[in-house]
Each structure stands twice: as structure tokens, then as C-alpha cells.
Image (cartoon, rainbow, N blue to C red):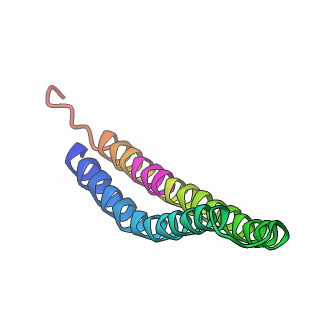
Amino acid sequence: MSISSTSSVSMSTIGVSLNISDTGQLEKQATSIQQQIQQENSSKDDEKTKKAKIQQLETQLENIKSQIQQKQSQNINEVLGASGEELKNDNNSKKADSNNIIDEFA
């Protein structure tokens, strides 16, 4: 029984690593926006224009960070949900096995 649990966990781990690429793309976007903010800070635009551009970029950055957190939460919930189902199935099979005990001394 424990063999199936181990293989199921590794399948869940594979699912998580596939979903990490989603957050990786968002993290790249966040890094790009941070670089744009730095460039805007050092630009020769007037202060009012700088402030408006930076505020817009910071809003985009916050949205992306929020999306990253949502994806990470989804990934965790998917793994925990899958693990919970696997444990429930494993427990059900153990109950079924315990009903089949043969008394050799009878």
C-alpha cells in the first residue's frame, strides 16, 4: 500500500513543478516592471510625469504580485487536495484489507 502512496506523491510533485512555470513567467514580468520603475526614476522627465508613470507601473506590479500569490495558493491547495484524496483512498483500502483477515487457527 505504501508504494502507491509514494508514487502518488511524486506525481503531485511533478504537477507542482509544472505549475511553477506559470509563476515564473509572472515573476519575470514583475522583474521587468521593477526595472522600468528604476529607469523612470533616473529619467529626465519632469516630476509630475515621472510620478504618474511610476504610479502606473507600481499598480501593475501589485497586480502581478497578487496573481503570483493566487497561483502559489492554488498550487498548494491542489497538492494538499491530491494528497488528501490519496490518503483517503489508502485508508479505505486498508479498511477493506482488514475485513479479509483469515483466522488460520480456526
| Left or right, residue 87 beside residue 37 | left
Quadrant assignment for the C terminus = top left
Task: Check the image and report above or below for 18 versus 89.
Answer: below
Q: Position of residue 27 (x, y in %)?
A: 50, 63
| Left or right, residue 6 beside residue 54 | left
Task: Check the image and report above or below for 34 versus 76.
Answer: below
Task: Check the image and report above or below for 83 versus 59.
Answer: above
Q: Nearer the viewer, residue 17 or 1?
A: 17
Q: Residue at x 79, y 71 (%)?
A: 46
Q: Position of residue 85 (x, y in %)?
A: 46, 55
Q: Nearer the viewer, residue 6 or 68?
A: 68
Q: Position of residue 99 (x, y in %)?
A: 34, 42
Residue 85 falls inside the magenta stretch: yes
Q: Residue furthest right?
A: 48
Q: Residue at x 69, y 69 (%)?
A: 57
| Left or right, residue 21 beside residue 71 | left
Count of numbered badges drawn on the protein: 0
Magenta residues: mostly which secondary structure?
helix
Residue 60 falls inside the magenta stretch: no
Among the 4 quarters of the image, the one containing residue 18: bottom left
Q: Residue furthest left?
A: 104
The residues colored magenta run 79-87
| Left or right, residue 81 beside residue 64 | left
Task: Check the image and report above or below for 25 versus 89.
Answer: below
Among the 4 quarters of the image, the one containing residue 60: bottom right
Among the 4 quarters of the image, the one containing residue 97: top left
Q: Nearer the viewer, residue 36 or 68?
A: 36
